[in-house]
Image (tube, rainbow, N blue to C red):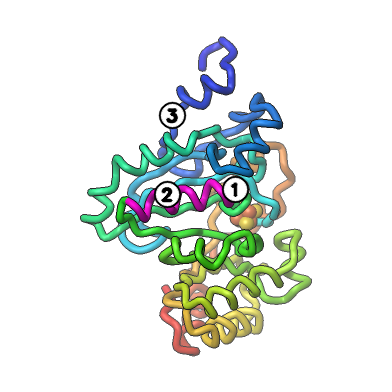
Amino acid sequence: MGGETMTWQKVSTEVGLDAKDPFELRVNLSVDVPESAVKTALKTGDMGFLHSFTTGSTVDGPGVRVVAWTAGCQWRCLYCHNPDTWNMMNGLPVTLERAIEALRKYRHGLKLMFGGFTLSGGEPLMQDRFAVRLFTAAKSMGIHTALDTNGSLGERLSDEELELIDVVLLDIKTWDPERHRHLTGKDVGPTLDFARRLAERKRTIWLRYVLVPGLTDDENDVNQIAMFAARLGNVARVDVLPFHQMGRYKWKKLGINYALDDVSPAPPWLVERVCGQFRSVGLIAH
Ligand code: SF4
């Protein structure tokens, strides 16, 4: 951007949408967007606030995927890898047309690679209207869709809108209510309610579980989640994601107190133990 000041409209068209990966720090890209424009965007979905698009992901749903990372999250997970996505105004203002165009570029390749489009974050349902319109566009291009969510805002989607999403990557952070509040700042109830609703509607879930030594490795907690997931009947797979420190530098750069400085990445034996707990109730776990 050089030394010159850019208007937000210019930022919106000139700042690149693609990032090498979501670990690129992006801040303040929407601070100049007037409040009225933000409100209209949230109401209509004409514009979204995105950290970036990344391509080639093989860990955010089936096949090879294009992932749009949204900005804005009301949770404050102690292990969050992308705290720059907490504030919606850190994201790049992106018109719906521009986002759809970015997706259109990849539609043939995604089909060839049995992949699709994943909306992740941040929490994508903070921008539920934008999410619905992007999923609608993706489906009309024949692209497989996935939503990566903490599930707490699931009630913002109607039953018909749920049909636009082929698979929900549902993050369950931990089971114990007190531990959940400590870990995320919020209650686990709405996430579990959303999981039950997805089960009733027969929508596929891929459950995601971030494994942090000393924080989310409690055997009983994992058992409770595993039994809950098995009873749902719509959990096609469980991804156990070993905690790593790749996001630590963002906390430091943003000047936020990071509580997990001394936590080591989850060792392979622990990952295996937790995967085994999910498998023992009949689930497929990786
Ligand atoms: S829900 Fe996701 S984006 Fe939000 S704070 Fe937790 S890990 Fe970060």
Give how far apart the Cα atoms at labels 3 and 1 are.
Answer: 20 Å
In this view, 10 is above or below 99: above
Q: Residue at x 70, y 52 (%)?
A: 74
From the image, state whether disc 3 or disc 1 is nearer to you: 1
Where disc 1 sits, the SS reads: helix
Where disc 3 sits, the SS reads: loop
Residue 130 in view in this figure: yes
**Disc with the residue nearer the chain's start (1 vs 2):** 2
Q: In the rendering, which numbered label is found on residue 127?
A: 1
Amino acid carrying label 1: it is Gln
Cβ–Cβ below 8 Å for labels 1 and 2? no
Q: What residue would you read off at disc 2?
A: 67
Give how far apart the Cα atoms at labels 1 and 2 are.
Answer: 15 Å
Image-based side of 130 in relation to 38, left or right: left
Residue 57 in view in this figure: no
In this view, 36 is above or below 155: above
Q: In the rendering, which numbered label is found on residue 16?
A: 3
Q: Residue at x 64, y 64 (%)?
A: 155
Where disc 2 sits, the SS reads: strand
Give how far apart the Cα atoms at labels 2 and 3 are.
Answer: 15 Å
**Which segment is the magenta one?**
127-140
